[in-house]
Each structure stands twice: as C-alpha cells, then as structure tokens.
Image (tube, grey):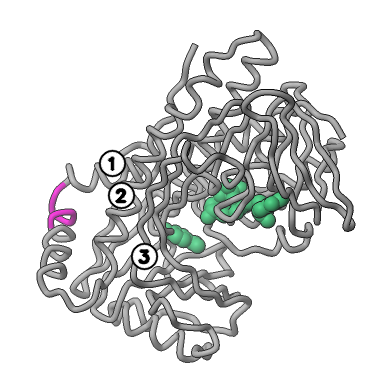
Amino acid sequence: MRTQVGIIGSGPSGLLLSQLLHLHGIESAILERQSREHVEGRIRAGVLEQGTVELLRQAGVHERMEREGIVHEGFSLVFNGRLSRINMHGLTGSSVMVYGQTEVTKDLIAARLSAGGIIEYEAPAVAVEGFLDGQPRIIYEKNGQRHELICDFVAGCDGYHGVARRSVDPGKLQLFEKIYPFGWLGILSDVPPVDEELIYANHERGFALCSMRSHTRSRYYVQCELDDSVDNWSDDAFWDELRRRLPPHVAERVVTGPRLEMSIAPLRSFVAEPMRFGNLFLAGDAAHIVPPTGAKGLNLAASDIFYLSRALVAYYGEKRTDLLDRYSETCLRRVWKAIRFSWWFTSLMHRFGDDPLNHRLQMAELDYLAGSTAARTAMAENYVGLPFETFE
Ligand code: APR
Ligand code: PHB
C-alpha cells in the first residue's frame, strides 16, 4: 500500500490528522492495532478547550458535539469543606465544552469512513523504517501477514505504548518522566451529575472529582492507592468514599446508581524530545502524557495535530518545509506549559502521604486562589487552554 501520510494509531490524534489532511486534498491511511469496537468503547476524559472545539469545527465533526456537548463557564475547588468557584468565563472570556473523548473518537471515525478514508483495524504496526534517509515505510501485520505502507511522512499517533517512538534511536531521544504515588479510581454511571459544573475536591482522605458526560451520565473519581484494584470496590463502597470526600451539602445531593464502567488509571507526567526525526513526527500521547487533573491529554493531542496538519498542508501546497522544521519546537513550547499546569494542579489537590507541611502549603495556596483574582485568572487561563501559535 502507498499513501502520502502514513498514520499509526486511530485515537483522536491520528483520526483528526487524517480528517484535516483529507479536507486539504492530502491522502493518508491509518493503521490501528485494536478493533473499531475497542477504540470506540474506551472511556477517556471529557473536557474540550475552545481551541480543540474550533479545530473539530474546522474538521467538520462539530454537529453532534454542538448538539450534545455542554458549555461550562466555571468549575469549583473544594478544600477545608468550603467551595470556591473559578469563573473561567468571567476571568478569561473563554469557556470549555464537556463532551466525551469517546464521542469525539466516534464522530471522527464516522467522518473518515464516510469520506472513504482508509482505517485498517487489527493491523498493528511493528516497525517504522527509512524515515531518516531513504523511503519512509511502516511495517505492519494484518491477518497474520506482514505488509508495508510506503509513504512520504509517518505520523506516530500511537500513544504511550506505540511503536513509533520505539523505532527511534534511543540515543536521539531525551525522556522526562514523573510517576505519581497514587491512581484515580473512576466510575461512569447513568445518574444525573451532582452539580451543573465540575467539582475538584482536596480532602484528607484524598482527591475527588465530580465530572459528567451529559445531564444524565456522571463520571466521578477518587484518588486511590497505586496497587488498588477495581475488584476491591463495590458500587456502594465507591459512592460512600466519594460522599465522604465532599462537603455535606454536596454529598447529600449525589445520586447513586450501578456502574457502566469502573477503572483505575495511574498518573504520570512524560515528555519525549524532540517530536520529529527526519520524516517521522510524533503527536499526542506518543510524545507526552499528563496526569488527568485538568483534562489536558486530548487537548494537547489536538494542538499537536493543529501544528502538524498546517505544516503538511504548507509542504504539499507550497513546497514549504519551514513549518515541518519548526514542528517539534512549536509543539513542545505548548506541551511543557500544559505539563506544568497538570503537575501543579495535581500537586495542589492530592494527598501525598502524611506530610503535614505539604498539606498546609496546599491549604495556603487554595486559600490564596480563593482570595486573589490574579491567582484565579492564572489558573483559569491555563484551564481553558493557552492559545495556539499561528504563523504566516
Ligand atoms: N500499531 C497500530 N496502532 C497502535 C499501535 C501499533 N503498534 N500502538 C498503539 N496503537 C493505537 C492504540 O490502540 C490507540 O488506538 O494507537 C492509538 C493511540 O491512541 P490514544 O492512546 O488515544 O492517543 P492519542 O490519539 O494521542 O490521544 C491522546 O487520548 O489516550 C488519550 O489520554 C490521552 O486524552 C489523550 C488522548
Ligand atoms: C472526566 O470527565 O473524565 C474528567 C474531567 C476533568 C478532568 C479529568 C477527567 O480534569
């Protein structure tokens, strides 16, 4: 098989890239290790920055998002049993859209397939070759047979465990990583959310988050031990633990119900530098991971794809290589700011052992946020998403 841009991975990064390239007349093909059902069934975060919403509009996959997504103008922080609202819209003029990544993925798959786009499911890439000099190609397997996808460029959109980053000489990669000493236990349930907005709680028993997918579907999380297992948690035990970590007037409004899904996610900050190696470009989780506090994962993937799609359009349309040359540096500037914000928000809200100094520092910072418009503005502008850089 031959195409212009060979894409590994049909998560949001690979799908959005393929769709934006298609709208500019550039051909691509996606190779995906998993089945379509598996990809469409994965439960992920659900907060879209304004820039991500704009990009999905440009990609023509906005119809259902605009119908079913919910615009949020603020969220709340809970500490010492009190609730402090961050009025994102009042402070920055921007808001976010609550619409699940699972739904974004389904919309993108439908758009690609209805336009005749190529997505090979159950076709794991096993190696990327020829990207530094020579003919770039992706070696993949399908039905037990080995195949090659020959292309001009390879986009490694294959997530943290993908093959693209591992095809690079380790001596050419600089990796930065921090693993946090806890996880998030999450439940998805068809019950109305406890509040119209998200609530992030710092509690002595650990962090809790009240989120949602719609007016009838809630997503809640509680901080848990890294070695905990969902087998240790009945639905009742989860609801009890969640309510314990919320102020009583919030806890009493929590509507409980059976789980649709329950899972544990570890928390990690990770960056691989650079993000370009000859004709191989890394994007999304293949290049960086943020802890979920702040919901930056999908939004960072979208900003990488914004830069990569522009650079490829400039290359095919005008033979320009300058944007491809600047891809890594441009992405990484925004990536590091989101890595910093997610680390900061994680550090502020979670229980790190029994360190009383750390706890007092968290309370001081949360109290400062509650009392300072400047501090809340800094938080809000990061939460709604920093602007994309644009070039001539
Ligand atoms: N060959 C083909 N496909 C692969 C391979 C491989 N060797 N390895 C991984 N994949 C696929 C995975 O099955 C997955 O569908 O690549 C895809 C990567 O998708 P995501 O993990 O969703 O990553 P990305 O598209 O960059 O999206 C980033 O999604 O994972 C969340 O938290 C993350 O919100 C962030 C966003
Ligand atoms: C979610 O709804 O899954 C979610 C929302 C906000 C976050 C993280 C996760 O910060």
Q: Which mark is residue 87?
A: 2
Residue shown at the point (41%, 39%) measured from the top left: 335
Q: Position of residue 103 (x, y in %)?
A: 66, 54
Q: Which of the 4 image quarters holds residue 216?
A: bottom right
For residue 143, side relative to residue 68 (left or right): right
10 Å neighbourhood of mark 2: few (<14), some, or many (≥20)?
many
Residues rendered magenta in the picture: 368-372
Q: Is residue 55 visible?
A: yes
In the rendered view, would you say 372 is above or below 242? above
Q: Position of residue 128 (x, y in %)?
A: 69, 40
Q: Position of residue 312 (x, y in %)?
A: 64, 22
What type is the residue that disc 3 sits on? Ile
Residue shown at the point (62%, 35%) measured from the top left: 57
For residue 331, side relative to residue 261 (left or right): left
| Circle 1 SS class | helix
In the rendered view, would you say 362 is above or below 245? above
Q: Is residue 160 magenta?
A: no
- Pointer 1 residue: 91
What type is the residue that disc 1 sits on? Leu
Q: Are marks 2 and 1 in contact (CB under 8 Å)?
A: yes
Inter-mark Cα distance, 2 to 1: 6 Å
Q: Which of the 4 image quarters holds residue 282?
A: top right
Inter-mark Cα distance, 2 to 3: 13 Å
For residue 349, side relative to residue 388 (left or right): left
Q: Nearer the viewer, residue 216 or 122?
A: 122
10 Å neighbourhood of mark 1: few (<14), some, or many (≥20)?
some
For residue 120, side relative to residue 381 (left or right): right
